[in-house]
Image (cartoon, helix red, strand yellow):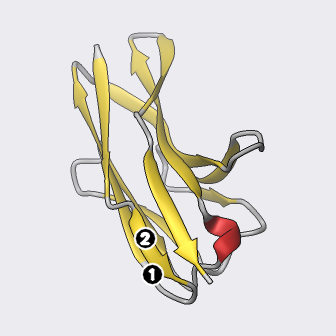
């Protein structure tokens, strides 16, 4: 079993910064990718950023240039540095990981962390 533990959410004023962290624990042999999704009230969950095993990154257009995803040295930890936040970034942010067990991949979610940006 794999657990994803998130931290770093909170309340910040527009223009401010926050850094989210997510650590994966359990019997992990390899991770295909880790990333962050977010869900605002009344909206669908959307991809924010993702980092692949080789280090490639993907970003939503709405955050590109403001957010940066990175990994820890152990590669089972992922960070999301969020700069120049605006009220539209307010949402619950979820960590996501696609974990390999032999030839089979299983997708996991964290419990979510609230990010609130005040105007």
Against 71, residue 2 (above or below) is above
Q: Are marks 2 and 1 in contact (CB under 8 Å)?
A: no
Q: Which residue is mark 2?
A: 11
Q: Residue at x 22, y 18 (%)?
A: 27
Q: Nearer the viewer, residue 44 or 117?
A: 117
119 sits left or right of 77 in the view: right
Q: Position of residue 26 (x, y in %)?
A: 21, 22
Q: Position of residue 74 (x, y in %)?
A: 22, 48
Q: Position of residue 104 (x, y in %)?
A: 49, 10
| Circle number at residue 45 | none
Q: Residue at x 50, y 43 (%)?
A: 94
Q: Which residue is mark 1?
A: 17
Q: Residue at x 51, y 71 (%)?
A: 68
- SS type, badge 2: strand
Which corner quadrant holds the N terminus? top left
Among numbered discs 2 and 1, the one appearing first in the sequence: 2
């Amino acid at each position: 079993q794999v657990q994803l533990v998130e931290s770093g959410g909170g309340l910040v004023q527009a223009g401010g910064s926050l850094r989210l962290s997510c650590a994966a624990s359990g019997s992990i042999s390899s991770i295909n990718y880790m990333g962050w999704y977010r869900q605002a009230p009344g909206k669908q969950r959307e991809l924010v950023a993702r980092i692949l095993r080789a280090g490639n990154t993907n970003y939503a257009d709405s955050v590109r240039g403001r957010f940066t995803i990175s990994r820890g040295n152990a590669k089972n930890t992922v960070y999301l540095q969020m700069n120049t936040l605006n009220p539209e970034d307010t949402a619950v942010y979820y960590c996501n990981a696609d974990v390999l067990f032999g030839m089979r991949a299983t997708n996991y979610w964290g419990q979510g962390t609230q990010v609130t940006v005040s105007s």
